[in-house]
Structure formats: structure tokens, C-alpha cells
Image (tube, grey):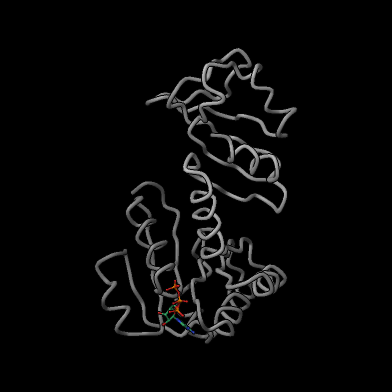
Amino acid sequence: MKSNKQFAVIGLGRFGTSVASALYNLGYEVLAIDADEERIQKFSEEVTHVVQADTTDENSLKALGIRNFDVVVVAIGEDIQANVLTTLLLKDLGVKYIVAKARNELHGKMLAKIGADRVVYPERDMGQRVAHNLVSTNVLEYIELSPVLSIVEITAPKALVGKSLAETNLRAKYEVNVVAIKRDEELIVPPLPDEKIKPGDILIFVGHTKGIQKLEELE
Ligand code: ATP
């Protein structure tokens, strides 16, 4: 067991099952909760414990001892009312850290208002990543930190190969910083200004979304 951090995941749709399995495979204790008996049975071998419960019922949540979990993930998808009500009850019961899945911006705002510690938008985020990857084949990973700030992982474009970071002048041209270079098995963090970019290097940038977009267009 990696640490004694305990996780609970509510809602075993595609997202919930993926989060729960990943945490379990990383060595953590995971309780999976769903209202649907069939889903619970199917998933019973994949995590530490499974429980059938309706999490919009305060007494069921109390009976599960949900307060004792370090992190509770609300992965109920379609039923926004159940998703919001569950989050609200978890907050009321004093759960330390609540992660809630939102379907859209308004839903996300509501979840943040009622006290979700972290709101996630899996469909939106994955859509953005796929789009950035389609626009530029160099883009390996894209994460939006805020509407104006992103992190991106790009295979070094030919236009930059052979130059040192100082020579590329990326900060002035694109308002981005190279925070790390992946070269084979090596990770260079932080790379120094005289570090020369080699073919096949993977550059990890953080910076202004607009600048990153221009950078993605480099061949
Ligand atoms: P995904 O895209 O991740 O598959 P989804 O939008 O399809 O998500 P749903 O299937 O709507 O997600 O919800 C996920 C699970 O949440 C379902 O298995 C459903 O039974 C469960 N669920 C819905 N309401 C409740 C509730 N009140 N208490 C417990 N589980 C619930």
C-alpha cells in the first residue's frame, strides 16, 4: 500500500470507473459507490470496496463514514441535480477534499460556489487536447491552466533544432518559457539558456495561450 490516503469515488460511469481503477492501481484504498446494483457488482473486483448507495440521501452518506475519506470524487454525470446535491451534502458533512465533475461552465461555477475544492471538466479538457494535437502533429500534451495560461509538450519543431534556448528568443517572441526538456530518458529541469535543442527533444512550455498557439504552428 503506497500510503494510507483513502479515496471514495461516487458514480461509476466511464469517468468514475477510470479514476477509481487508476487510484487503486496506484496502490491506494478506494471505495466505489453507485446507486446501481449491477454497476457495483461488475466493478467489485476492480477496487478495495464497493457499496451500493444513493448519495443524495444524507443518512446513507453518514452510514458510509464518508467524512473519514481524504478525498471524495463526485463522478455522477448526467443527473446534474444528484451531482450537485451529493457535493452539497459532502461539504455539509465536512469532507476534507471534494473533487466534482462538471458538465459545463455554469454547472462548474455552481459546484465551486457550494464548496467543491476542485472542479474537473473531463470532456472539455480532453476535447481541447485532441484539438491541439490535430492542429499540430508536434503537440503531445496540452493543459489549459487558465483562459490565458497553458502548459504544452511539443516535439521540437525543425525551426528550433540546433539553436540554444537563448538563441530561440522564445520568451520575447511568444511569451513562453521552456520549463523542461525531455531527451530520451533524461529530463532537463530547468534547462539553461545555453542548452542546445536536439532533434527529437520534447520541449515543455508554460506561457500565454496565444503565444503557445503560434508556437504550435511552427513546422
Ligand atoms: P461518463 O461520461 O463518465 O460515463 P455519465 O455522464 O455517463 O458519465 P452517468 O452514467 O450519468 O455518468 O453517472 C455515473 C453513475 O452515477 C451511474 O452509474 C449512476 O448510477 C450513478 N449515479 C447517479 N445518481 C446517483 C446517486 N444519486 N447516487 C449514487 N450514484 C448515482
For the point 26% across and 76% down, which residue is it?
A: 42
| Residue at the image position 32 percent from the left and 78 percent from the top | 40
Kindly give the residue lying farthest to the right in the view shown: 172
Q: How many marks?
A: 0
Picture quarter with ligand 1: bottom left
Where does the image place residue 160, in percent across and percent down from the top left?
56, 24
The image quadrant that residue 105 belongs to is bottom right
The answer to whether 93 is drawn above or below residue 132 in the figure is: below
Please identify the quarter of the rendering in which residue 171 is found.
top right
Find residue 175 and report its image quarter: top right
- Above or below, 185 relative to 121: above
Left or right? Give the position of 179 relative to 25: right
Give the farthest residue toward the top. 194
Percent x, y of residue 106: 69, 74
Instruction: State left or right for residue 68 relative to residue 22.
Output: right
Write the residue at 57% across / 16% down: 163
Residue lying at 52% horizontally and 65% vertically, measured from the top left: 123
| Image coordinates for residue 188, horizontal then vertical, percent | 50, 23
Q: Where does the image place residue 177, in percent across and percent down from the top left?
A: 66, 30
Q: Is residue 12 or residue 173 the one in the foreground?
A: 173
In the image, is 205 to the left or to the right of 13? right
